[in-house]
């Protein structure tokens, strides 16, 4: 594919649209002689609702702080009146620069809640404008007026006639000024009617006119001339009309200064507000939805990597991440019939009791279950393979085990993360998601990173160790299984012993030179400390002091915890019920490659059309294929410029190859108008797809625009053997 | 306020005499159009409007920025002279002739007893409106046959206005800049604080001008700065550490503060509210976060590479691509590798447009890992365009071969590449392209310093 198709935005609304269809028809999930499709669908729907609710709650929580401070900023009484009566200062428009991160589509939700918040608690006069609607100042002013005065009218029916008179010519800020005056007067009168306010408060009210908030949703996209003019105009009216601007900025605050000259930016009084970065947002979503034992649906390590990869490498969009999660949920419940067991514990146990014969058979075929069977006694094995009822019982037991595994897994994971996240160079990853991925992927304790992390832990200073263990204890307190309580007790026991050591070690340090030397090192870099300590240890076997003994006990204890609880999910029997693992499908769906799919469609039409007659060996051109495919394959053999006549001849030869066998070769070589027309159509389709382009260099020729694998290897280009390289590189030769 | 006005009159006496001359005989026909120009905040509109107010002359004052269409201008003029009812008679999209017709009709009902004035502020905007508007307004008197004068106020000279076809030449007036010693100090001193003596304030103004005069002559801005920093100036007095006569001590106290103000609040890097708050907090140590301090932008991983590729494509000549981005490029003789004009250019000339193909080719050779040409890669290009980090150039052939320019600075790219530089090769590439440009950058730097020195002088 060429530039023509490659340029542009590719929007995909994968999951949400599909779901709508499901609700209407009852779902894809029901078909295919599948008795519990409906159940799966309801489970999926319920889960999705919790996901949605949780993400909204998270978003609200995260935005609360910045939104509140924004509201506070706007409420700030009489910004203009605060200092002396003096013109320049008064005509400065208070402006909030709201930093939102580079993913613009994600801002919509923030702005929605901001609008609601402002309208509820600060002022009814809130306008939000998009750059797209405001290509000129006129349109911008019109938009502002429409939104403000329209609102006023909808409240008060009587005024409707007035606004109908409002012609386009009067679409000015001064008209808005008039309107604002009448509205505030009206409001005052009503307020006075409602409550007999004391004269003092009346004064206050008069001073604190409700501000008119204008939100520029995408500041960068605005035409800077339009913005400048608008700001200039508004600054003329600040005395009568208390404007407040909010710039939604995706890049950095310096964008304001890049867009606006000094003469304009001197009219603004800019304050910067930072919303939470998207990575933090992702982390909290991750904590809530994925590292949560309450949420039965799980993702395998590969799937997590795909989703996080899309986030980090491509879009920084939390919304897309959640969409991806939703999609994988749908995929899982659609493709895995046993996902009927993927729900809360008691429900899962109930449905395990009434598993159908088919599903029991499916369980027997699960790889994890087969592995489990192999570990059993031969007698038990026979029972498991023959007795359905027994399988159901075992299944219940295994499900229980799976749930307890999860319940223990997450607290220990968090503990390990809190222990290792402060180590230098983060051997186990900065974020808990990295640790989680490596834990469910393989045996963590077999990795080098884990070894180096433990080594670093073994040389922790005492205060650091105590602090880390304290935070672990905090985490474990919230875990409510028996085993975790046991662990907590042991941990607290260690903590007690460490504290008891306090007095002893300080006595020791006064007498023991080695220890005091070590105390000095505590302040320095941990790596140096490690190095020197290792040297010392290699030189002579030092007698360990009580703290060191205790420390190694603690670390051994943690190691044992990791080995016990952080086993990969793959080894858990029945993990397929909860874990969605087909990362390939996910990647194909979420990170689409239009170019490769078009090429696949053209070279192997069978792949999409599923017509038996289209099955061909690679390298041959079948006449049964659509014209476009034939023309495409023929053009692959040409150079940069393609002679249309030669191309046509080749096409006709292919087409008539099939006919050749039964008719005489008399007609061969002559092309009837039908074939001619089909060829022309196919070529114009090629042009539409961007593979060829008409050229002025030679008549009767078209220029080829893409270069495939063949050309590459021929030319011994070492760049990207498997990815088609653009015509540009070819032209360079 | 009133004495300030009188002061300005005195300062601009020579100009004013002539202006007032024109307006002195209100019952006679005046000169059809007057053009007044001068720098920002030299008192053009202030003088004209206060003359209008003081002499109670009938006038319509219009700011041309507000007139997004000529209809608005007509509307405002008519409603100022004949009341809103007259303005309502204008058709929906009034043309110039509509305006003239209506004006004639109205003025025949109520003929002018004295000269009417139409004052058009920021008249330079008129040039963007209908091309016939300006010539017509210049001889409006003739057209409507009424005693009316159009006063144009602008920051730029008349030569930039004159249409190709020629027009009626208005009377020109120039408002000169305020001189440092005389007028600025005196004007600024009118704002003096009631609780301090005018002498103290005058000396404060002198100190302030000493710092700011080299960068700013805008009266409004200077007044703004004067009020912002005065409390700081008075601090030693309030604390009793200095007397009003200790000018030197006060100067020592305020000077560094003003210097800092020049770098921050004057450039609006820090808003004036924040500046005041900081002064109140008294904590010198708390450094305010300056706007341009957060220049760092978090970008997705591949977006960073795309931006780097775009930068390389924009600033390196296309001929050099083969050398930089191919592993087995042929030997190129060093002597004529770069043509003469290429050696001197690049950074001074600014970014050059490049086609999408070239961007992608460089991108693929810059990125270490294998990247599928997914839709999201391409959509990142368009989001970079909306973020104004890239800009799209040219309007023809948008679909087939869009062209882009990289619109970020070298520093920005270096910061980004430092973030992603797991791969040493990329740094090499940047370095390679920089070697070529370093010469140029050095030239550019020296040029910049020269320019800023000039400005300071």
Image (spheres, helix red, strand yellow):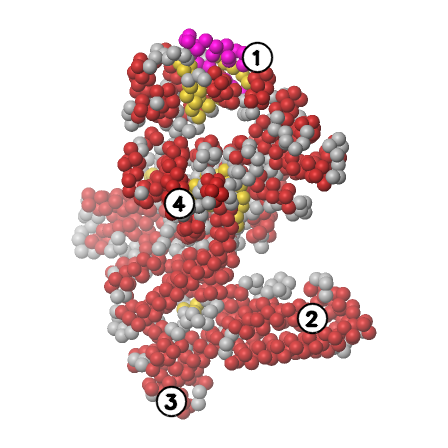
Label 2 – label 1 distance at C-alpha: 84 Å
Give the number of the mark in front: 1 or 4: 4
Is residue A229 shown to the viewer in this render? no
Q: Between A698 and B54, which is closer to the camera in this rendering? A: B54
Reply above or below: B251 against A712. above
| Residue A622 magenta | no
Chain of the residue on which disc 4 is drawn: A
Residue with the mark numbered 3: A382
Disc 2 crowd rating (10 Å Cα; few below 14, some 14-19, many 20+) is: some
Circle 3 — which element? helix
Please state the extent of the stretch shown in magenta in the rendering.
B12-38
| Same-chain status of marks 2 and 4 | yes
Residue with the mark numbered 1: B14
Label 4 – label 3 distance at C-alpha: 84 Å
Circle 1 — which element? helix
Label 2 – label 4 distance at C-alpha: 65 Å
Residue beneath the point at 44% across and 26% down: B63
Residue beneath the point at 25% across and 62% down: A24
Residue B364: x %, y % from top left: 49, 50
Circle 4 — which element? helix
Left or right of residue A262, residue A56 in this image = left
Give the number of the mark in front: 2 or 1: 1
| Same-chain status of marks 2 and 1 | no
Is residue B43 shown to the viewer in this render? yes
Residue with the mark numbered 2: A462
Residue beneath the point at 64% across and 36% down: B229
Label 1 – label 4 distance at C-alpha: 56 Å
| Residue A191 marker | 4
Residue A238: x %, y % from top left: 47, 35
Residue B61: x %, y % from top left: 43, 22
In the rendered structure, which disc, 4 or 3, sits on the residue that comes first in sequence?
Answer: 4
């Amino acid at each position: 594919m060429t530039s023509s198709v490659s340029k542009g935005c590719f929007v995909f609304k994968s999951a949400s649209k599909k779901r709508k269809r499901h609700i209407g028809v009852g779902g894809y999930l029901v078909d295919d002689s599948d008795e519990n499709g409906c159940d799966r669908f309801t489970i999926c729907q319920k889960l999705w609702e919790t996901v949605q609710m949780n993400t909204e709650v998270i978003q609200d929580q995260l935005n609360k702080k910045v939104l509140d401070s924004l509201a506070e900023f706007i409420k700030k009484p009489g910004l203009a009146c605060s200092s002396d009566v003096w013109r320049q200062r008064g005509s400065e428009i208070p402006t909030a620069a709201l930093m939102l991160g580079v993913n613009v589509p994600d801002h919509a939700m923030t702005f929605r809640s901001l609008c609601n918040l402002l309208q509820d608690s600060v002022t009814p006069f809130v306008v939000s404008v998009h750059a797209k609607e405001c290509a000129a100042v006129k349109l911008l002013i019109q938009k502002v007026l429409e939104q403000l005065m329209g609102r006023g009218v909808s409240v008060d029916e009587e005024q409707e006639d007035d606004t109908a008179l409002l012609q386009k010519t009067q679409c000015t800020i001064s008209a808005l000024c008039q309107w604002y005056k009448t509205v505030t007067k009206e409001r005052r009168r009503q307020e006075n009617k409602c409550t007999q306010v004391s004269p003092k408060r009346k004064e206050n009210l008069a001073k604190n006119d409700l501000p008119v908030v204008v939100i520029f949703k995408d500041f960068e996209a605005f035409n800077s001339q339009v913005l400048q003019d608008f700001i200039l105009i508004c600054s003329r009216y600040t005395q009568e009309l208390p404007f407040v601007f909010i710039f939604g900025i995706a890049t950095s605050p310096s964008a304001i200064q890049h867009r606006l000259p000094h003469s304009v930016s001197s009219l603004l009084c800019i304050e910067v507000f930072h919303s939470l970065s998207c990575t933090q947002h992702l982390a909290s979503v991750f904590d809530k939805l994925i590292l949560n034992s309450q949420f039965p649906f799980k993702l395998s390590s590969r799937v997590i990597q795909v989703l996080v990869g899309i986030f980090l490498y491509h879009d920084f969009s939390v919304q897309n991440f959640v969409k991806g999660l939703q999609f994988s949920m749908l995929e899982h419940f659609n493709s895995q019939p046993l996902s009927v067991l993927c729900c809360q514990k008691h429900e899962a146990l109930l449905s395990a009791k009434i598993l159908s014969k088919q599903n029991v058979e499916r369980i027997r075929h699960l790889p994890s279950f087969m592995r489990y069977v192999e570990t059993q006694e031969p007698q038990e094995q026979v029972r498991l393979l023959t007795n359905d009822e027994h399988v159901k019982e075992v299944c219940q037991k295994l499900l229980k085990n799976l749930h307890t595994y999860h319940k223990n897994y997450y607290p220990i994971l968090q503990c390990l993360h809190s222990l290792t996240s402060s180590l230098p160079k983060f051997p186990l990853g900065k974020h808990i998601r990295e640790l989680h991925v490596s834990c469910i992927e393989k045996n963590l304790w077999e990795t080098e990173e884990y070894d180096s992390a433990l080594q670093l832990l073994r040389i922790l200073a005492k205060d650091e160790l105590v602090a880390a263990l304290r935070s672990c204890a905090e985490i474990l307190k919230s875990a409510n299984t028996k085993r975790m309580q046991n662990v907590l007790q042991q941990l607290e026991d260690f903590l007690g012993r460490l504290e008891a050591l306090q007095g002893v070690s300080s006595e020791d340090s006064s007498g023991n030179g080695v220890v005091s030397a070590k105390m000095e090192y505590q302040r320095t870099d941990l790596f140096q400390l490690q190095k020197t300590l290792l040297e010392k240890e290699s030189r002579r076997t030092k007698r360990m002091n009580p703290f060191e003994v205790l420390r190694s006990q603690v670390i051994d204890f943690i190691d044992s915890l990791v080995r016990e609880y952080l086993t990969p999910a793959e080894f858990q029997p029945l993990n397929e019920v909860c874990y969605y693992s087909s990362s390939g499908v996910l990647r194909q769906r979420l990170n689409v490659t239009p170019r490769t799919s078009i090429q696949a469609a053209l070279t192997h039409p069978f792949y999409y059309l599923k017509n038996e007659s289209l099955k061909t060996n690679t390298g041959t051109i079948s006449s049964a294929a659509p014209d476009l495919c034939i023309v495409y394959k023929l053009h692959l053999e040409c150079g940069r410029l393609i002679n249309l006549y030669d191309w046509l001849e080749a096409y006709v030869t292919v087409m008539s190859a099939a006919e050749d066998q039964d008719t005489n070769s008399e007609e061969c070589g002559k092309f009837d108008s039908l074939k001619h027309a089909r060829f022309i159509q196919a070529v114009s389709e090629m042009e539409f797809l961007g593979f060829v382009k008409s050229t002025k260099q030679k008549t009767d020729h078209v220029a080829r625009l893409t270069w495939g694998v063949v050309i590459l290897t021929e030319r011994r280009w070492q760049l990207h053997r498997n990815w088609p390289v653009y015509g540009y590189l070819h032209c360079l030769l | 306020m009133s004495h300030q006005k009188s002061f300005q009159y005195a300062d601009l006496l020579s100009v004013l005499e002539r202006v007032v001359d024109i307006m002195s005989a209100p019952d006679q026909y005046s000169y059809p159009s007057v053009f007044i120009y001068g720098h920002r905040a030299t008192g053009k509109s202030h003088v004209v409007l206060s003359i209008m107010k003081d002499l109670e002359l009938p006038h319509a004052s219009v700011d041309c920025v507000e007139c997004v269409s000529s209809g608005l201008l007509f509307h405002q003029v008519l409603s100022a002279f004949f009341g809103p009812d007259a303005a309502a008679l204008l058709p929906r999209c009034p043309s110039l002739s509509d305006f003239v017709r209506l004006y004639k009709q109205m003025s025949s009902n109520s003929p002018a007893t004295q000269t009417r004035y139409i004052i058009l502020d920021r008249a330079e905007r008129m040039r963007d409106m209908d091309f016939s508007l300006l010539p017509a307004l210049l001889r409006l008197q003739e057209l409507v046959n009424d005693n009316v004068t159009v006063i144009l106020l602008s920051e730029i000279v008349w030569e930039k206005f004159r249409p190709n076809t020629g027009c009626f030449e208005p009377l020109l007036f120039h408002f000169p800049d305020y001189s440092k010693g005389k007028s600025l100090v005196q004007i600024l001193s009118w704002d003096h604080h009631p609780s301090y003596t005018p002498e103290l304030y005058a000396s404060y103004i002198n100190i302030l001008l000493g710092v700011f005069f080299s960068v700013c002559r805008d009266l409004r801005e200077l007044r703004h700065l004067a009020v912002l920093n005065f409390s700081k100036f008075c601090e030693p007095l309030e604390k009793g550490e200095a007397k009003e006569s200790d000018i030197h001590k006060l100067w020592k106290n305020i000077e560094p503060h003003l210097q800092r103000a020049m770098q921050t609040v004057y450039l609006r890097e820090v808003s004036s509210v924040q500046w005041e708050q900081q002064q109140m907090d008294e904590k010198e140590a708390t450094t305010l976060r300056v706007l341009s301090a957060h220049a760092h932008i978090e970008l997705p991983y591949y977006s960073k590479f795309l931006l780097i590729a775009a930068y390389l494509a924009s600033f390196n000549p296309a001929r050099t691509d083969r050398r930089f981005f191919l592993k087995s490029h042929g030997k190129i003789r060093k002597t004529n590798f770069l043509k003469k004009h290429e050696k001197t250019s690049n950074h001074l000339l600014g970014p050059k447009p490049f086609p999408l193909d070239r961007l992608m080719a460089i991108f693929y050779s810059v990125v270490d890992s294998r990247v599928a040409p997914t839709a999201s890669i391409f959509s990142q290009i368009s989001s970079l365009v909306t973020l104004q980090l890239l800009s799209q150039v040219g309007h023809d052939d948008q679909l087939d071969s869009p062209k882009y320019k990289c619109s970020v600075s070298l520093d920005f790219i270096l910061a980004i590449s430092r973030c992603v530089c797991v791969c040493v090769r990329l740094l090499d590439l940047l370095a390679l392209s920089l070697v070529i440009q370093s010469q140029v950058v050095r030239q550019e730097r020296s040029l910049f310093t020269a320019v800023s020195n000039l400005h300071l002088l």
